Image: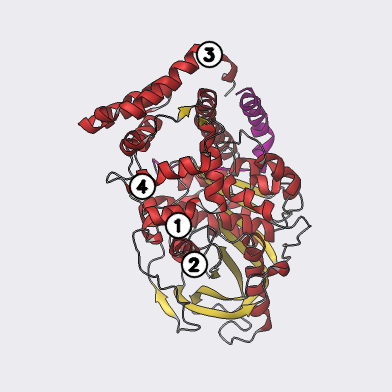
Amino acid sequence: MSNVSSQRVKPPPTKADKSKLARLMTVFLSKGRRLVARHKLPLIARRACRLYLDDQDATVQQQCRQVLKSSWQLNPKQLKKFLNTTIGKALLDWVKQFFRWSQQQDPHQTLAQLILQMAADPDGLSLLSASRHYPEVLKFNPDYLLFTVKRMEWLLKTTRMLVVEVASLAAAEATQSPQPFSQLPDFRRSGKFAVHRRMMTLEGRKVAHGSQAPSHPLEVRCFAPSPWPDQPVPLIVQSHGLASTLADIQLYAAHLASHGYCVMLPRHPGSDVHQIRRLLQGDANEVFEQSEFLDRPADISYLLDVLSQGTDPVWRNRLNLEQVGIIGHSFGAYTALALAGARIHFEGLEKVCGLPDQDPNPSLLLQCQALTLPRQPYQLQDHRVKAVLLLDAVGSEIFGAQGLGPIHVPVMLVAGSHDMTAPLVLEQMRIFRRLPTERSYFALIHGKSHLRSMHEFMQSLELDRESSWETQPEPTSEPLEEVTETVGNPIEQTIQALSVAFFEAYLSSESTPSAYLTAAYGQYLSQSPHECWLISDRSRPALEKQLQIMDEEYLAV
């Protein structure tokens, strides 16, 4: 990436260019519906993506075309409820910057009405419905439109450059630690233990830090090895993401249990899929409860406290509760970092969230909600946590460099090159470069996105249902049931192997970090087209030089 400065630079747009762009966009949306209706949408999408992404690779061009051709079938009543949430209003605040407003216009009301009309259209939310309902009195703001295009160009280009840089650093590290992995245990395969699953529900507790929310029972899905090993086994707790279900990442739990770990998955009731359903039903006012920034870590500490009491004979004397690992996905990664010692840095977060021109980082919609909390130091760390593995992590700005400073346990970040919800450049890489611990690892998987399946996620929300959802709690107890599916698709297999390698190194008494936590092991796990590049903290000095170049480019945009 040393040739960054030599790349051709497009001249800044003139005032005439901006006026022309605004005029073209307005004409298309207000008068171009006949072109779209005549089945020209694929052609328009192709030409638009070629115009704005002329120097991007074929994959990026294809993604652009897919977005422009996409159509979302949403329930207008449910969408209206979302737009009235804090996150919905923040989203409208961002969208309104693309237009120019008179003093007589109400941006929120105008945009909400337009979006709801599009949602009610037979073609759903799409370019076609936008062309039908776009009001001619709405005028584009070409300055912000071009600014956003530049930011997106920077993000796409920098993501590609960062992938190349991490791959290069991993190749250099791999030459220093060759291993005959074909002769060593293959952590992609299930372990020697059978796996049994059990649900349990813990009694309600007082929620964290004086929140006014009612106490709630804590439902926990447990995966245990069978037969139990002779010695107490380390416990790993998985924290799910926003609007998620326990099933979303339970494949990793089952795999770890087959290798001799006990894995528990608590359901965070204020930020799971049931919370979204309650919102769309009209029984909740927010996408997630703001107290979840405190309650999520408290859920896990409470679980550890109850297990320490030894009242349940199923777990009594079988768990090593001083050697606890955490796996967190997305919002769950925030939870894991908080338990590892990270602290909310309100001052830094306020500066980022207060900027009129925020990063092209959708996860800020979540992180900025922490500003609704009372400004006080929160002690969320649990010293029983000895290692954390973060999947598609969210938390770069809510913690910042200062907030991540107290972390001194081993951390592994697993990121995807195709994550646009929590972009690699703006989230996971920023967290990695700010971690103070020397025992930090960064695994980048080519082609991995934030969600396992967008289709499955949308199905889990059950957006088309009008009737009441059944959100009854899981049974308080059920017999152990055998789990047979423990191996996932190629990307999941890579993550499964990395998780076993990481926790074997830092939770197991028979640790061998030198063998598996290496770039050479990342190469061994790679399955085209989903290559895995694994680097350690040793590569951070060289990586930092390139990241500084990217930062300078970003500030120049």
Residue holding disc 4: 119
Q: Amino acid at mark 1?
A: Arg
Q: Farthest left residue?
A: 38
Q: Residue furthest front?
A: 104
Give the amino acid at mark 2. Answer: Asp
In the image, 4: left or right of 56? Answer: right
Instruction: Residue 305: name its quadrant.
Output: bottom right
Q: CA distance from mark 1 to mark 4?
A: 44 Å
25 horizontally vs 180: left or right: left
Q: Say which amino acid is labelled 3.
A: Lys
Q: Which residues are magenta?
A: 528-557
Q: Nearer the viewer, residue 89 or 441?
A: 89
Q: Secondary structure at mark 4?
A: helix
Image point (73%, 62%), residue name: 381
Q: CA distance from mark 2 to mark 3?
A: 49 Å
Mark 1 vs mark 4: which is more N-terminal? 4
Q: Earlier in the sequence, mark 2 or mark 3?
A: 3
Residue placed under numbered mark 1 in the picture: 188
Residue on which the image places disc 3: 15
Cα separation between marks 1 and 2: 43 Å
Pointer 1 and pointer 3: residues touching (CB < 8 Å)? no
Asked if the magenta segment contains residue 243, the reply would be no
